[in-house]
Amino acid sequence: MSTAKERLEALGLTLPKAAAPVANYVPFVRTGNLVVISGQICFSADGKLDPAHVGKLGAEVSVEDGIAAARLCAINVLAQVQAAVGDLDHGVVQCVRLGGFINAVPSFAGLAGIMNGASDLMVAVLGDRGRHARSTVGVAELPLDAAVEVEAMFEVK
């Protein structure tokens, strides 16, 4: 079985440095054997939002770009959990839950498909430990007009 690091490399991905909070909150809270990750938006490795990931699904943002934005959110979630526990393989028992917020026009009905970008990446990197419960909601607005935001909860050692 390959490690999370090897799976990331096989996907051509490197976890960025965990992003610092931009308001009055912390990026994660560890309590007992749980780590709760604050919502992560779709910042690229350079810490910026790609213009393709700004705006609303069903308007300025295509389905493909929305899926890519959700995937970036999941990468940023993994960076935060790694910062919390030090190592994805030895510290993470299970991804318990993902919560997805999709910046969408009211008529956009493809929310679940967009959130699959995050869910699929979590399973691709963590294997069965990446299978999770999930909620996905459409919202009127997100910070910096990001297309997607993802929060998470992990069981850890």
Image (cartoon, grey):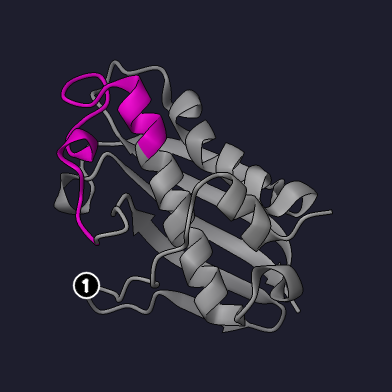
Work out whether residue 116 or residue 49 is closer to the camera in this orientation and state it.
Answer: 49
**Residue 48 position in % (x across, y down):** 20, 56
Q: Give the residue displayed 73% in from the left and 60% down from the top.
A: 3
Relative to 61, is 38 above or below?
below
Relative to 98, is 147 above or below?
above
Query: The N terminus is located in which quarter?
Result: bottom right
Say if the magenta span includes residue 61: yes
The residue tagged 1 is: 22
- Occupied quadrant, residue 147: top left
- Occupied quadrant, residue 123: top right
**Residue 55 position in % (x across, y down):** 17, 35
Count of numbered marks: 1
| Direction from residue 87 to residue 50 in the image, left or right | left
Work out whether residue 31 or residue 57 is closer to the camera in this orientation and state it.
Answer: 57
Say if the magenta span includes residue 36: no
| Direction from residue 58 to residue 126 in the image, left or right | right
**Residue 39 position in % (x across, y down):** 39, 59
Q: Give the residue displayed 42% in from the left and 19% down from the top.
A: 110
Label 1: few (<14), some (14–19) or many (≥20) C-alpha neighbours in 10 Å: few
Q: Give the residue displayed 25% in from the left and 79% down from the top.
A: 24
Query: The C terminus is located in which quarter?
Result: bottom right
| Direction from residue 122 to residue 41 in the image, left or right | left
Q: Is label 1 in a helix, a strand or a loop?
A: loop
Q: Give the residue displayed 32% in from the left and 49% down from the top.
A: 42
Relative to 123, is 79 above or below?
below
Which residue range is magenta in the image?
47-68
**Residue 57 position in % (x across, y down):** 27, 26
- Callout 1 amino acid: Val
Work out whether residue 18 or residue 132 is closer to the camera in this orientation and state it.
Answer: 18
